[in-house]
Image (cartoon, rainbow, N blue to C red):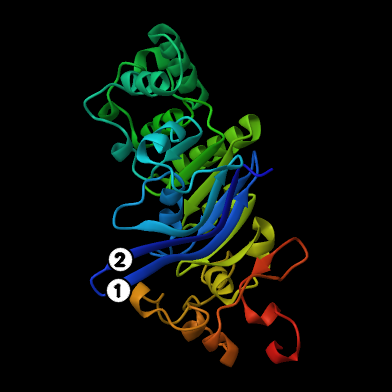
Amino acid sequence: MAILEISNLCIEFPTRRGVLSAVEHLSLSIEAGEILGIVGESGAGKSLTGNAIVGLLEPPGHVTGGVILLNGQDITHLSDAEMRKVRGAQIGVIFQDPLTSLDPLYTIGQQLVQTIQTHMDLSRADAKRRAIDLLVEVGIPAPERRFDAYPHEFSGGMRQRVVIALALCCDPCLIIADEPTTALDVSVQAQIIALLKRLAREKGVATMLVTHDMGVIAEAADRVAVIYSGRLAEIGEVRSVIDTPKHPYTKGLMDSIPQIGQNLELLPNIPGAMPRLDSRPDGCAFNPRCEKAKAVCREKMSGLFTAGEKKQMAACWVYAGGDEYA
């Protein structure tokens, strides 16, 4: 059974000008020990999906449809009090900027111990031992000494390691990592990616890795889900999606990445821009930017169709079969 199962998730924002649909009928799952990459442009709905899972959607945004299952338990509409018991204990969260996750007024040790004691029945001494063990696990040097340090005394990479330690405090079965490497330099990014991969393999933690960086996806993820304008465009094993992208949007993303040895004056780019939520076109949201769009693409939204040998699927009418879409 999958650790996380999302079925037909819909997220909406009521406004004065009407209801804006930010995420539409999104379905995906993550197995134990698997890293699923979620990639797409800014505003595609990646972070909103992660926030919906952990119950941190900013009002007036709310889930209007679909089901979120964690180990078979429906957590879609838990109260704030019920969600706090799940968040931290069963779900660990790693945010983009570690300074927003760490309280500057408390030492690293105080924050770790407080989180541990909130969700686990441990004495302060036992919680401190566990906190130090976690600092060792995420690669913090001299953990006994750094236990009493404040967040500002750590580098960006070390702070992110502390945030990962916080996410792991209570042995969660799922981690939501929202742009965990964006603010870090390349060498530190590689260390954080290696750490997340090791934790997934050794602890069997299911991980949702939200990012806009296909390089991070290629290095860290087992599978990748490409989201466009709040809808799932393509999903499959990471190497299959990167090497043989099926959806025109995914292909455009991959073509725009420079390759070693290329001699181009200009990189290929996808014309136009992702539509605003209040001006999403009929049919496939990508159709105004797609060179191969047909009449059906402008009329009806496509479901997911098998588009490769390794369970690769794409929301494109090209793969529906039959002469009508050939």
The spot of residue 26 in percent (x, y) is 53, 62
Secondary structure beneath label 2: strand
Q: Quadrant of residue 248?
A: bottom right
Quarter of the figure that contains the C terminus: bottom right
Question: Residue at 45% of width from left, 9% of height from top?
Answer: 126
The residues bearing labels 1 and 2 have C-alpha atoms spaced at a distance of 6 Å
Residue 18 is marked as 1
When the figure is inspected, residue 133 is found, relative to residue 309, above or below; the finding is above
The spot of residue 236 in percent (x, y) is 66, 60
Q: Is residue 294 visible?
A: no
Secondary structure beneath label 1: strand
Residue, disc 2: 14
Quarter of the figure that contains the N terminus: top right
The spot of residue 132 in percent (x, y) is 44, 16
| Type of the residue with mark 2 | Pro
Residue 180 is marked as none
| Type of the residue with mark 1 | Gly
Tell me if 236 is positioned left or right of 83 in this view.
right
Counting every numbered tag in the picture gives 2
Mark 2, Cα crowd under 10 Å, few <14 / some 14-19 / many 20+, is few
Q: Is residue 22 visible?
A: yes
Q: Residue furthest right?
A: 309
The spot of residue 54 in percent (x, y) is 43, 44
